[in-house]
Image (cartoon, helix red, strand yellow):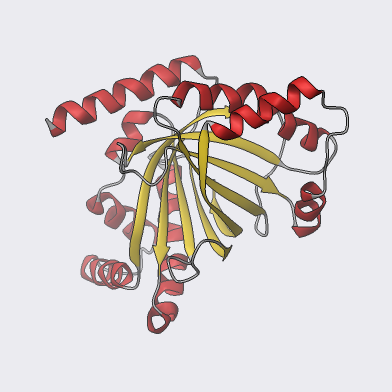
Amino acid sequence: MKKLSITLIIVVFILSWAQAQEPRYLVIEFIKVETGQMYDFIEHKDFMQKVYQVAVNDKKITGWDFWSLQSGADSGEFQYITITYYKDPVSMMNGISDDDLVKYAMIAYPHLGDKQIRDLYGRSLLSRDLAQRSYMAEIATTKDNFKMSKGVLASFDLMKAVEGRFDEYEKAEREVFLPIHQKRINRGLMGSWSLLRTALPFGSEAKSTHLTINLYKDYLQFFNAQEFEDLESTAEQRAAEEKGLKSRDQKWVYLATLENLVR
């Protein structure tokens, strides 16, 4: 049954892959670090950045981000978000094995031996608690030339589509809300926007079914965007927005700053 479920997930993602232009596949991890482990985790973050750079060079992944949480539902729930980017759904589901990570670490740190690498990697894992991991596919995005760099601000909006209104919600995001975000981008009030669909966890008990990522170059742009009001929108458009909002439940919004990235 488990093997069949994974096969179905991969089929769904391959279908969405064929329908989208240059889609991205992301594994998003929400990480909690206890106060006493903070120093060890910072070492882990710096250690893993070089390891993931080797993984990018080997074309195992296409990128990696490390985000520091600024606000959210509960500051004690988790403090960091990492995103690992893959070229296709099969690579995403397979991920990077511990053996491959050790291999990449030995390339990144040639002065260290196998035992030292494994000990360092093992200790680094103990410094954090993986609160949640989500496998996602990008299914819609704005047209922009936004460049990712340290200090970029992101709003991660976790959504749960109303049961029975899954397609209606995605249609609303593409046809109603994407144009609104595109207007903000065209007016310099936003950097980029994308809609992601969750593969795992899935089912009626999943905390969310979708995620939107809103990118801003800094806090000034972020706050200006919050003040934006589309005075040109028609009554029909506003009604469509209201209908779209009812097709989903906005679970949580997390504001985070990009601290490290690998491409």
Judge by depth and name the residue closer to the eye, 77 or 144. Answer: 77
- Farthest residue, direction right: 231
| Percent coordinates x, y for residue 35 in the rendering | 42, 81
Q: Is residue 187 placed above or below 32 in the rendered structure?
A: above
Q: Position of residue 191 (x, y in %)?
A: 73, 42
Look at 43% across and 31% down and name the residue there.
87
The structure residue drawn at horizontal position 21% and vertical position 69%, both measured from the top left corner, is 115
Quadrant placement of the N terminus: top left
Query: Would residue 142 be seen by someone viewing this image from the given angle?
Result: no
Which residue is situated farthest in the left direction here?
Answer: 1
**Can residue 129 be spotted in the picture?**
yes
The vertical placement of 84 against 114, above or below, is: above
The answer to which image quadrant residue 180 occupies is top right
**Quadrant location, the C terminus:** top right
Question: Who is closer to the viewer here, 24 or 133?
Answer: 133
* Count of all numbered marks drawn on residues in the image: 0
225 over 6 or under it: above or below:
below
Image coordinates of residue 218 in percent, x first then y, are 75, 56
Place of residue 88 in the rendered image (x, y in percent of width and height, measured from the top left): 40, 29
**Residue extending furthest toward the bottom:** 36
Q: Is residue 101 above or below residue 129?
A: above
x 78%, y 47%: residue: 225
